[in-house]
């Protein structure tokens, strides 16, 4: 028992001061508390159905402090309690339909979020909460295949929802980490109305790299910045990682995550962390297939190249395309750049109803030496151009790697 390296050797981290203090207050500094008393305290956060699920979690009408702590540790998804989390969830799910449970959980989470600044900011700019059924269906689909343990173990968003739930119920001062904080220029705060639903925001946020999840800044929206491709380019050029959200004239809502800054280039660039997604009528992520590197494209004012913004596919056969003739878009029936891809828009050629673009990771500021290197490189390019204009060759030309045309 408890051989070297076994899980029995590992020490469970003690509760923090804030966690202990919150649990003491929850139990009114008693060793045993009535479950009905807990439900009374949690009434504003729990739907009727979720009250039943919570009762199954505690499995007693008079939980002692040890049981209250155990439930907290399990739902906070502490690594040491991973198997206990699976066990406690198996008990709850054995008494409920998986999809019904995820609906109840998400409806309860919506109530828990109402006390947060992030929720207030999103509601202020018009975010709705109509996609709960859609998100619950997406979350539960793998669990409905039969292997509940594998579903619970592999569903990290479900774990985040449970952590947000127990953190709220126990009044532990911790960020819920389900909605990103947002920044909208005061100039546009009155006119801007987002396309997004709270369920879609959670879905997109969870799909992004960790360093793109916490803070989003609005770069462009048709409701605030107008319908101009030049204005669009000026707003998003060289800003950092972004997400694009489009709604077509048939009501489909979709977009893409760009892992690098948008730059004017004559060819595709980007990397395999780029993806496109559908929000309505289907909810899905289409990640890189590895088949090609045609992730991002942006150009304007060229006679021999496509002018617009594209993600995936190839010239003329785009996964997602916003034309420089603003308002026109394309999405092909298939796209080899991304897995599980199907046409994002209702029709291959579509009219843009609305568009918004968020910076989800700011471009790093160049350090002084990087700025100097860039200035030196610019001077070298200028000197080389002067030599070529004079009909002379620069002797070092060709000894260094060819720079990517920008």
Image (cartoon, rainbow, N blue to C red):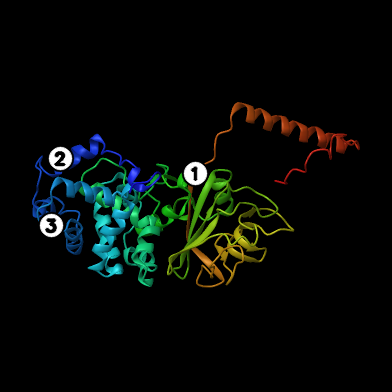
Q: Nearer the viewer, residue 1 or 272?
A: 1
Please provide percent x and percent y for residue 106.
29, 60
The mark nearer the N terminus, 2 or 1, is 2
The residue at the point 68 percent across, 59 percent down is 306
**In the picture shown, does residue 398 fall above or below 242?**
above
Q: Secondary structure at mark 3?
A: loop
Verify CB contact (< 8 Å) between mark 2 and mark 1. Answer: no
Q: Name the mark nearer the viewer: 2 or 3.
A: 3
**In the picture shown, does residue 210 fall above or below 392?**
below
Q: Name the mark nearer the viewer: 1 or 3.
A: 3
Q: Which mark is residue 60?
A: 3
Whole-number angstrom distance, CA of label 2 to CA of label 1: 39 Å
Q: Nearer the viewer, residue 11 or 353?
A: 11
The mark nearer the N terminus, 2 or 3, is 2
Q: Nearer the viewer, residue 241 or 23?
A: 23
Q: Provide the residue designation for mark 2.
A: 24
The image quarter containing residue 183 is top left
The residue at the point 60 percent across, 58 percent down is 310
The image quarter containing residue 314 is bottom right
**In the picture shown, does residue 404 fall above or below 46?**
above
Crowding around mark 2 (Cα neighbors within 10 Å: few <14, some 14 to 19, many 20+) is some
Whole-number angstrom distance, CA of label 1 to CA of label 3: 46 Å
Q: Name the mark nearer the viewer: 2 or 1.
A: 2
The residue at the point 20 percent across, 62 percent down is 53
């Amino acid at each position: 028992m408890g051989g070297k390296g076994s899980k029995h050797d590992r020490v469970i981290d003690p509760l923090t001061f804030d966690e202990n203090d919150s649990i003491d207050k929850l139990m009114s500094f008693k060793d045993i508390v009535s479950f009905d008393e807990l439900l009374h305290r949690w009434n504003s956060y729990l739907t009727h159905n979720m009250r039943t699920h919570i009762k199954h979690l505690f499995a007693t009408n008079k939980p002692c402090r040890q049981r209250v702590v155990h439930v907290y540790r399990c739902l906070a998804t502490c690594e040491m309690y991973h198997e206990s989390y699976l066990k406690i969830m198996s008990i709850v799910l054995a008494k409920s339909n998986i999809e019904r449970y995820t609906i109840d959980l998400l409806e309860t989470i919506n109530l828990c979020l109402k006390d947060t600044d992030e929720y207030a900011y999103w509601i202020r700019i018009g975010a709705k909460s109509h996609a709960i059924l859609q998100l619950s269906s997406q979350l539960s689909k793998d669990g409905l295949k039969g292997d509940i343990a594998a579903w619970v173990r592999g569903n990290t968003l479900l774990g985040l929802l449970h952590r947000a739930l127990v953190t709220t119920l126990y009044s532990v001062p911790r960020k819920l980490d389900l909605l990103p904080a947002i920044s909208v220029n005061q100039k546009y705060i009155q006119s801007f109305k987002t396309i997004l639903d709270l369920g879609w925001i959670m879905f997109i946020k969870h799909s992004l790299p960790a360093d793109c999840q916490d803070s989003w800044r609005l770069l462009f929206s048709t409701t605030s910045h107008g319908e101009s491709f030049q204005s669009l380019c000026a707003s998003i050029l060289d800003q950092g990682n972004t997400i694009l959200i489009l709604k077509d004239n048939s009501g489909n809502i979709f977009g893409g995550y760009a892992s690098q800054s948008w730059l004017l280039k004559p060819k595709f660039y980007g990397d395999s962390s780029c993806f496109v997604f559908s929000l309505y009528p289907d909810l899905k992520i289409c990640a890189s297939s590895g088949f090609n590197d045609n992730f991002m494209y942006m150009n304007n004012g060229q006679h021999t190249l496509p002018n617009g913004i594209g993600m995936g596919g190839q010239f003329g056969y785009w996964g997602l395309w916003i034309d420089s003739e603003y308002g026109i878009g394309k999405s092909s029936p298939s796209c080899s750049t991304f897995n599980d891809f199907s046409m994002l828009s209702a029709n291959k050629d579509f009219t843009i109803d609305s568009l918004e673009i968020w910076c989800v990771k700011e471009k790093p500021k160049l350090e002084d030496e990087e700025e100097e290197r860039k200035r030196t490189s610019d001077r070298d390019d200028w000197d080389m151009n002067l030599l070529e204009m004079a009909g002379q060759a620069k002797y070092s030309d060709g000894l260094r790697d060819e720079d990517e045309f920008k």
